[in-house]
Amino acid sequence: MSVDKNGLIRDIRLPFGLSDGEAVFEALKKEGLPPSTHAFVLRRSLDARRKEITEVFTVALSDIYSEFCYDFSKPCGREKKVLVVGFGPSGLFAAYLLAEYGFCPTVAERGKPVDERVKDVELFWKTGVLDPESNVQFGEGGAGTFSDGKLTTRINDERCRFVLNTFHRFGADRSILSAAKPHIGTDVLRSVVRSMRNRILSLGGEILYNTKLTDFSVENGRLKEVYLNGEPRSFDAVILASGNGAGDTYDLLMKKPLLIENKPFSVGFRAEFLQSDINIAAYGKNASDDRLPPADFSFFTHLKEGTVYTFCMCPGGYVVNSSSDEGRLVTNGMSYSGRDGKNANAAFLATVTAKSPLQALEIRRKIEAAAFSLHKGKAPATLIKNFLDGSVPSSFGHVLPTFQPGVELDGFEGIFPEKTLSMLQRGIAEFGKRFFYDPQGVLTAPETRTSAPMRIVRDSAFQAVGASGLYPCGEGAGYAGGIMSSAVDGLKVAEEIIGLNREKL
């Protein structure tokens, strides 16, 4: 343990429950530095695998450690007209950065403001009556608004710290700045989105709700006009951040002179277990310690045909209906900031590679339609033991499904391709061997919107190949997978439009 060139003291293992101030004091003492040294906890992670619960800290010396930041004191916009299509994480952060630099962006969001959207979603979960333009996929905040609010990511980009600081600035708890696995929950995320929207408006931005990109024209390789609700508009730059749930937007894009390529995507189901059982599996004899947070898990296994893995694990969460199209069914996971639900859930997914973007979209739609048709909107659900032996259960056990407006016991044959079904069966059996097996765990299908089924190819300036002036962005364009990476991609695209030198940022 020593101070590295970035001003970080790493791998400081201390008893569980110490405050940030106590951790900083111990780190400085071990390094022989005076207690008056300016320092702060950059990261803390829990280790409950041993007899004694410990936490591992990284402490940053304030005089050496430098965080990524922008200089908002030098606005440079107002002359360039920029449209942001979609107000999920990538569109939100792109619009926010543009606004702070004086660009007064216009945002076109096909759905409603977050408060109205929440009412529509809750009504849908209660009655099954879907609003195709205001649901878990569409509306202010994007699909991530109805999720666990996870801010973890596999990308290694210094902008991640800026995203965390921004979420904290607009209302998220300070703990996200140091947590190894930060999350803010669907309830807090809604409030943060609302606050960021108000900041964009205060800086001269414009937000058009219930406004959909219905068409655009390309002339001589450059974007000419866009059509919002059928009306032509002209902009100097258009950021396309429409999310991966907008199937009609994909249909539109595939008719245009763009370069769109295949990318692997994933399909599967949500698995629910009792959170108390997951705590025991993860924490062992320490599971009864009330100071410990609800445990999570992650899993992957490589098969000959592809990979089976978990995604978006929601401790103390709920399986939710994320449909956005009539006659199709989609599941997702969600939890509130307290993560205090009785069940835990996670997506279990198998990778799929299609022959073309069009075929990928057709596979996704076929799975969603097949699941819906079984029980007219209620989700097919089964137990793990029945999924593994191919039978249909007669009743639920100690794990009760949380999906609304309800589930029906059924098998998954006819929903997934046989190869995918086989991969999922072998994957969840392996999960049981490695981590935790509950024969009465509930599986609810299908989960199909975890990643985009295609990628809109862009050049080194982040513009679509075949349509300069159009900037595909975020998860829907195939460049992100989750709130954090989507937000970072939105920042990168906005930087390009603003004219910031990325190498010096």
Image: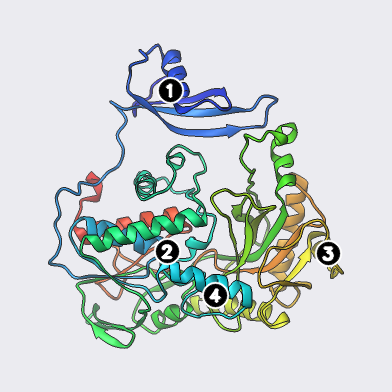
Find residue 311 and report its horizontal and vertical position in percent. 59, 56
Marks 4, 1: nearer the viewer: 1
Q: Nearer the viewer, mark 3 or mark 2?
A: 2
The Cα atoms of the two marked residues, 4 and 2, are separated by: 26 Å
Q: Secondary structure at mark 4?
A: helix
Q: Earlier in the sequence, mark 4 or mark 1?
A: 1
Which residue in the protein does label 3 denote?
Answer: 386
Q: Amino acid at mark 4?
A: Ala
Q: Is residue 430 left or right of residue 495?
A: right
Specify few, some or many for label 2: CA neighbours under 10 Å numbering under 14, 14-19, or 20 or more: many
Q: Earlier in the sequence, mark 3 or mark 2?
A: 2
Image point 37% across, 43% down: which residue?
161
Residue 283 in picture, x, y percent from top left:
69, 36
C-beta proximity under 8 Å, tags 3 and 1: no
Residue beneath disc 1: 24
Q: Amino acid at mark 3?
A: Asn
Asked if labels 2 and 4 touch by Cβ distance under 8 angstroms, the answer is: no
- Report, in whole angstroms, how far the alpha carbon at label 3 lies from the one at label 1: 51 Å
Left-right relation of 319 to 399: left
Number of marks in picture: 4
Say left or right for 388 vs 192. Answer: right
The residue under label 2 is 141
At 47% from the left and 23% from the top, the residue drawn is 23
Residue 307 seen in this snapshot:
no
**Depth-wise, is mark 3 or mark 1 nearer the camera?**
1
Looking at the rendered structure, the secondary structure element under dot 3 is helix
Q: Residue at x 14, y 50 (%)?
A: 74
